[in-house]
Image (spheres, helix red, strand yellow):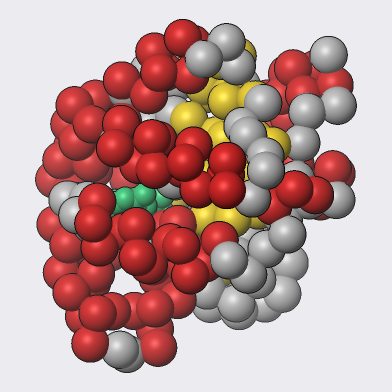
Amino acid sequence: MKTHIVLLGPPGSGKDTQGKILSCKLGIPLISSGEALRTEIENGSEIGLEFEKLIASGALVPDEVMFEFFTTILSRYNLSEGFVLNGFPRTLKQAEFLSGYLKEVDCDINCAIYINVPDTEIIKRICDRLLCGNCGAVYNAYLNPPKNVSICDRCGAPLQRREDDEEQVVLKRLEVYHNETAPLIEFYRLAGVLFEVDGVGDIGSVTQRLLEVIND
Ligand code: AMP
């Protein structure tokens, strides 16, 4: 079983949902850069305010800032026991930084999974996405609606939209993805650890495809 996993794919390809499921099934932590940045924003720190502006515009946090921030996050984990990384790396520089960091703690990525979903499907998915701020459940107003329009089925908390899920911001995030992040597919292909999975279909089917790759 492969346990040093990076999830790749455009925003809205299901990395977050699948990452949570994999983390549970494999018993290894999900380390999500987007979640870590949003927590920093909620904490109201000075750097959090900077993150908030960048995220709301659909731009990336600059690499150098990200290196410092994410090193602190990574240092909380015993990485040699395995992990699912979501949202980091997002640029070639970040991928190189991560390789160097992992080498120092004596491990390496052995599975980078590219969840392939076409842009047309992404826009449909994200613009109708609803999130539970309490338990983290993710819904889609059309594809996977909650029983009550604005309440989480799982914990009863009110559902919210992510500020960066507005259509204009989504288009910007997709552009940034194609320019900055998509080249990582080639990076991990060259490293011999790339696996591609079709990300279209219901959540359970995509999980099965991911598990086949991981367990192979
Ligand atoms: P996500 O939740 O992964 O979609 O990330 C939301 C936003 O956080 C992104 O659109 C970026 O603005 C920022 N972000 C997350 N991860 C990174 C990263 N590795 N490098 C730079 N910015 C990031």
Say whether residue 153 is left or right of residue 125: right
- Give the residue at x 37% y 67%: 69
Q: Quadrant of residue 203?
A: top right
Q: How many labels does the image show?
A: 0
Confirm whether residue 33 shows in the render. Answer: yes
* Relative to 135, residue 22 above or below: above
* Relative to 212, residue 107 above or below: below
For the C terminus, the quadrant is top right
Q: Where is residue 132 in the image (x, y as percent from the top left)?
A: 55, 68
Q: Position of residue 213 (x, y in %)?
A: 74, 17
Q: Where is residue 148 in the image (x, y as percent from the top left)?
A: 60, 64
Confirm whether residue 138 shows in the render. Answer: no
Say whether residue 214 is left or right of residue 87: right
Q: Position of residue 1 (x, y in %)?
A: 86, 26
- Give the residue at x 57% y 25%: 112
Query: Quick one: 213 or 130, which is closer to the camera?
Result: 213
Q: Quadrant of residue 65?
A: bottom left
* Relative to 175, residue 167 above or below: below
- Give the residue at x 24% y 25%: 178
